Amino acid sequence: MLAIAVAVVALPTIASGALSGASTLAAAASNTTSYQDSSGENPAAPDITTLTVSNNDVSVISFKINIPNRPQLTQDMLFLLFADTDANPQTGDPESLGADYVIQVFGGEAALFRWDGSDFTRRAGDPPATSLIFAYQSGLTITISAAELGNTKRFGFAAIVIGGVAIDPVTSDLDFTNSVSDVAPAAGAGLYQYEVKITPPTLVVRKLAPTPAKPTAGKAFTLRLVAARSDTGAVVQNGKVSCVGRVGNARLKAQVQRVVAGAATCTWKIPAKAKRKTFRGSVAVVFEGLKASQGYASKVR
């Protein structure tokens, strides 16, 4: 694992505050925000043109750093993504505008480091970074859970890409003698800002299954409702079930009213004289404050 301090110290522009910069924001759907960086500063350097950040409803954050003039990832490229995850420039690294974490990609590996008061390091008790992955196609995509960035809800960030990095064959230290770099934002107006937003979860009805296929006079009739969380897809395995059943104007009392094998289950006894009348029923389940329900109607046979 490459020591992050080596890369930071090797780039004096970072320490002097060149992480600050002007930005142009454009909001898009699905809580996606795009950022425009200046381009063409150094034709020999990897050139960041745009950045896109998004998150899903389980707070997994994705950063896409577009570098059109580097269509492929090469061994001489090093990436640093600084994040001020508490949105407080007074905490974190004072030379990186308050960054609390930095993600490094180099040599085919990604690593997460946390500010310890004097350096970016890995310590016992730090986030395990198990969610951290990356991919490259005309730019770098980094994905990580907000939980591993201090459960951040709003953060500032900046990205650096360096090309021409070599490794000294004797000392194995990084050699930046012939390196070229690009920083986004470029200069002057602080970090890019992003807010993590999630859609409140709901319960979604997956299926409503009648047994038998039609209510039958004098027989038991069951409706089974399968509901799942919208964010995780987990099927409800318990909760409070409400059953409403009517034949004509007569209300029927449910004989079974509970979650059974992952389905909110309602069972009624259809009156023997209900043939050709209409049965109307509904099943509802409430779990952890979330509710799903669905109605049903059919002629009694």
Image: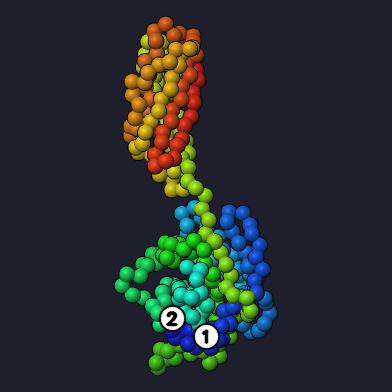
- Location of residue 300 with respect to 209 vertically, above or below: above
What distance separates the C-alpha of mark 1 from that of mark 2? 13 Å
Residue 253 picture location, percent across and down? 37, 18
Residue 99 picture location, percent across and down? 48, 75
Q: Residue at x 43, y 15 (%)?
A: 251
- Pointer 2 residue: 4
Q: Residue at x 66, y 62 (%)?
A: 26
Quick one: which residue is furthest to the left in this view? 124
Quick one: which residue is furthest to the top in this view? 273
Q: Residue at x 46, y 79 (%)?
A: 93
Q: Are marks 1 and 2 in contact (CB under 8 Å)?
A: no
- Horizontal arrangement in the rendering, residue 275 relative to residue 164 (left or right): left
Residue 22 picture location, percent across and down? 65, 74
- Horizontal arrangement in the rendering, residue 199 relative to residue 33 (left or right): left
Residue 52 picture location, percent across and down? 59, 65
Is residue 289 visible in the rendered image? The answer is yes
Report the disc number at residue 144.
none
Q: Which of pointers 1 and 2 lies earlier in the amino acid sequence? A: 2
Q: Residue at x 49, y 26 (%)?
A: 295
Q: In which image quadrant can residue 118 be found?
A: bottom left
- Location of residue 29 with respect to 227 vertically, above or below: below
The residue type indicated by label 1 comes to Ala
Q: Secondary structure at mark 1?
A: helix
- Pointer 1 residue: 15
